[in-house]
């Protein structure tokens, strides 16, 4: 029997990148997968697309209702929807910063609020939220993206204890650099690059080089699927041995030293 046989999952942002890779891995594991995103797409393995927008609370409620009406339950919620912006804080438009939080953070909030009632009533459920290593080690000139992921980490830690008595487990997964279309989709602001001595463009170029050389999205998709299906999960985890080491060192080393290292890598 396949590992996920009999399970039902809803994936947000599963039309591309690691979300799409997770849809493939989940269906390969025997999970009945529904996916919601703004872009219509033919999904692999018989997964079903529901057009929706994570920034609209009513849209997430409709997506969950669709799954419950069709399947009678929702075992897994996997939150992958998100995008990135870059630029100096001083020159970033407030509306762009707010949009970053609307999608990356409050998009998760909307999906979780829609899914939790059914999971709580059933006495079981697994919520997996895609965070980032940048949530643990914030990246200069990607400050707002880093802030959304740090917010997700805190949200997950607190939420996991709120829902623990009801058999619902919550985990945040922190990928590092992954070679996906996320890089090209990043909304880049070059404003202030001259005033900052070219450091904005140098920082983002270095980050994008690292991303393009990063791990395969299929590796991340398989990891996310494991987090969806394993019996118990940590509140937070990191994909890849190198990134696990970096996140651990960032906790153990003096913060002044960690800051200097990040500066040398991405802000000098």
Image: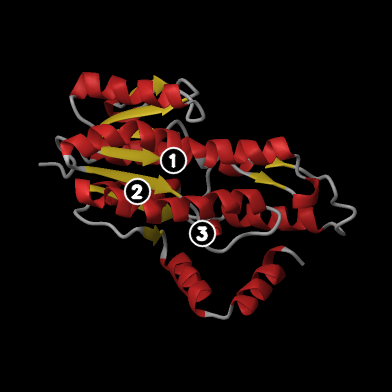
Q: Nearer the viewer, residue 195 or 175?
A: 195
Residue 125 lies, with reference to residue 231, above or below; the image says above
Does label 2 or label 3 sit earlier along the sequence?
Answer: 3
Image coordinates for residue 261, horizontal then vertical, percent: 65, 74
What's the CA distance linking mark 1 and mark 2? 10 Å
Which residue in the protein does label 1 denote? 80
264 vs 124, left or right, is right
CB contact under 8 Å: marks 2 and 3: no
Is residue 159 at all visible to an observer of this figure?
yes
Within 10 Å of disc 2 (Cα), the crowding (few <14, some 14-19, many 20+) is many
Q: Nearer the viewer, residue 148 or 228?
A: 148
The residue shown at (60%, 49%) is 145
What's the CA distance linking mark 2 and mark 3? 15 Å
Image coordinates for residue 180, horizontal then vertical, percent: 53, 43
CB contact under 8 Å: marks 1 and 2: yes
Within 10 Å of disc 3 (Cα), the crowding (few <14, some 14-19, many 20+) is many
SS at circle 1: loop
């Amino acid at each position: 029997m396949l590992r996920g046989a009999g399970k039902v999952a809803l994936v947000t942002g599963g039309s591309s990148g690691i979300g799409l890779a997770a849809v493939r891995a989940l269906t390969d594991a025997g999970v009945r997968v529904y996916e919601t995103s703004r872009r219509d797409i033919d999904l692999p393995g018989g997964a079903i697309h529901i057009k929706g927008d994570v920034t609209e609370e009513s849209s997430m409620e409709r997506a969950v209702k669709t799954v419950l009406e069709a399947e009678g339950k929702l075992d897994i919620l996997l939150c992958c929807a998100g995008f990135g912006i870059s630029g100096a804080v001083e020159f970033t438009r407030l509306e762009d910063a707010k949009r970053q939080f609307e999608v990356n953070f409050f998009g998760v909030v909307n999906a979780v609020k829609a899914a939790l009632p059914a999971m709580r009533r059933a006495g079981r459920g697994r919520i997996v939220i895609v965070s980032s290593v940048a949530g643990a080690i914030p990246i200069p000139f990607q400050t707002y993206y880093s802030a959304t992921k740090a917010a997700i980490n805190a949200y997950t830690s607190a939420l996991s204890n709120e829902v623990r008595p009801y058999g619902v487990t919550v985990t945040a997964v922190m990928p590092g650099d992954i070679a996906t279309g996320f890089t090209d989709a990043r909304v880049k602001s070059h404003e202030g690059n001259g005033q900052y001595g070219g450091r904005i463009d140098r920082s983002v170029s270095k980050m994008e080089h690292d991303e393009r050389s990063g791990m395969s999205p299929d590796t991340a998709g398989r990891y996310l699927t494991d987090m969806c299906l394993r019996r118990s999960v940590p509140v937070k985890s990191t994909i890849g041995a190198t990134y696990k080491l970096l996140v651990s060192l960032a906790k153990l080393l003096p913060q002044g030293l960690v800051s200097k290292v990040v500066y040398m890598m991405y802000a000098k």
